[in-house]
Amino acid sequence: MEIDYKDFLKLDIRVGLVKSCEKIPKSNNLYKLMVDCGEKDLRQIITGIVHYYTPEELINEKIVVLTNLKPRKIMGIESQGMLLAADLNNEPFLLKIDEKKPIPPGAKIK
């Protein structure tokens, strides 16, 4: 499916810095991340990548976040965005920021 460029411009994709990561109790697959997306408050994101990344691998990583996705409750906890990842045989590979130049949290991806 093709989309117009004006539709692409509706997406608010930003650099996010993972500040904390904790496994959600009573869940086998979910982490609660607190992510700095350059806003006043950290953004809470629920993600199902427990089997692919450890908290230590995520904390302090700069990742790519879709920030204007409508919030959704997952296991009763609000998720305020979505991490972007490549999918290879149903395994997620997080999109990360090249650190050759310092890019601050909140930088818009166009």
Image (cartoon, rainbow, N blue to C red):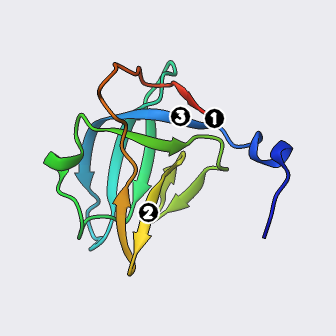
Kind of residue sitting beneath label 3: Arg
Q: For the N terminus, which image quadrant?
A: bottom right
Of labels 1 and 3, earlier in sequence is 3
Cα separation, mark 1 vs mark 3, equals 9 Å
Compared with residue 64, is residue 50 higher up or lower down, i.e. above or below?
below
Q: Position of residue 104 (x, y in %)?
A: 41, 20
Which residue is found at the position 51% from the left and 24% from the top?
107
Which residue bears the numbered disc 3? 14
* Proximity of marks 1 and 2: CB atoms separated by less than 8 Å: no
Q: How many marks?
A: 3
Kind of residue sitting beneath label 1: Lys
Residue 24 vs residue 82, the one in the foreground: 82
Between circles 1 and 3, the one closer to the viewer is: 1
The local crowd at label 2, few if under 14, some if 14 to 19, many if 20 or more residues have their Cα within 10 Å, is: few
Say which quarter of the image contains residue 16.
top left
Compared with residue 59, is residue 3 higher up or lower down, i.e. above or below?
below
Q: For the C terminus, which image quadrant?
A: top right
Q: Which mark is residue 19?
A: none
Q: Position of residue 78 (x, y in %)?
A: 51, 51
Cα separation, mark 1 vs mark 2, equals 18 Å
Check the image and name the residue furthest to the front.
100
Which residue bears the numbered disc 1? 110
Which residue bears the numbered disc 2? 86
Which residue is found at the position 44% from the left and 63% from the top?
86
